[in-house]
Amino acid sequence: MKITKAESFILHVPITPPITDAINMATHWGVTGVHIETDEGIVGYGYTGTTAKGDEMIAETIDRYYAPALIGKDPFNVKQIWDELRFGPMHWIGRSGITHMALAAVDIALWDIMSKAAGKPLWQYLGGHKPDKIKAYNTNGGWLNWSKDQLIKDITGILEQGFTAVKMKVGKPDPREDFDRVQAVRRAIGDEVGLMIDVNQQWNITTAMTWGKKLEQFDLIWLEEPLNPDDISGHRKLADELSVPIALGEHVYNKYAFRDYITQGAVEYVQVDVTRVAGITEWLQVAGLAAAHDLPVCPHVGDMGQIHQHLVAATPNAIMLEYIPWIRHIFEEPINVVNGYYTLPQQPGASTAIIPRYFNEYRVR
């Protein structure tokens, strides 16, 4: 099999209503990716996720630097291709961020092609470990721009749908308001429901240490991204001092950074995201590294779960998957959660094929 064509695309999918966390306000979710054609008629789709900002730089990297290097290659040599692109010309100007996210899209498309050629859904092609269902936790009711009343209404409504774990955002200018909101949610949902909080990097070490200790009383599953993601030593200090586990990975872009976090004891839930590290090839390496240290993987879903459902199903130490339904309607085989559990896809591929109607409706490039 040979690659005959590769071309980028950008979709901007509306988020209704718009959402806010401690560092972002988003009205659309950017689905920036690539479709790769082969001489056997199999087409692969891969993409990364953004807040609909900077997409054009990711697409330009794909079209100018990665696509020409793919022509004539056998997609089954995915690891060789990954190495060549990773250490190609773009290596000199960026080993994370834009170039890494562009490589993620390419790599996902190649795995999509391989599993389609095998006639298997990706999770099965990878040697599926969880053939029945995957526990989901819901993030979509806990946004920072919700009033406290709306926050409680949405989260309790999520529980009525069968979810048993939810995540909410914190990071208000006054941490006392965060404390009040977390306390109100815990009272509303009771003690049996799993609750996580996400700071989105908004705190410094003093704030995190002070308010992390105060918030421990609410029996949190984890404290997510409390500090700048480059501050490994600060996260290690928090992990040592707080009883609530530290979760992060959304803004950690390569396996070497994850290695340092893991070996220094600075992370306890590894949230590696296939759209932020360089695709499935690197995601599997990070998950294996976490397994070697007996750490659980709970991915952040920049893909909104379409690809991650396959990876979690094939990874023994992946214990749970985030659920955010913003873009599920655009896919031919969308993510599906029933009574708090993902049901696994059955169509061959990585569940990245987009319905033509929505591809045309949301395409901005």
Image (cartoon, rainbow, N blue to C red):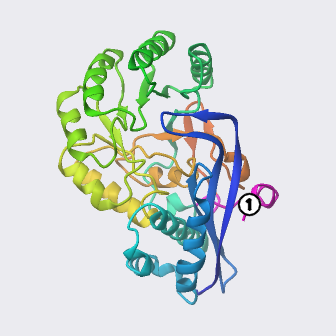
Is 70 colored magenta in this rendering? no
Element on which disc 1 rests: loop
Q: Left or right: 63 with respect to 171?
A: right
Task: From the viewer's side, name the closer residue of 91 and 315.
Answer: 91
In the figure, is residue 46 to the left or right of 9?
left
| Image spot of residue 75 (x, y percent) | 53, 80
Q: Which residue is mark 1?
A: 364
Residue 337 seen in this snapshot: yes
* As drawn, 270 above or below 21: below
Say which quarter of the image contains residue 256.
bottom left
Q: Who's the residue at 63% across and 53% down the image?
A: 30
Amino acid type assigned to the residue bearing label 1 in the image: Val
Locate the N terminus and report the quarter of the image it occupies.
bottom right
Q: Is residue 350 magenta?
A: yes
Q: Residues within 10 Å of mark 1 (few under 14, many from 20)?
A: some
Is 239 left, or right, of 176 in this rendering? Answer: left
Residues drawn in magenta: 347-365
Residue 327 image offset from top left, x and y in percent: 67, 47
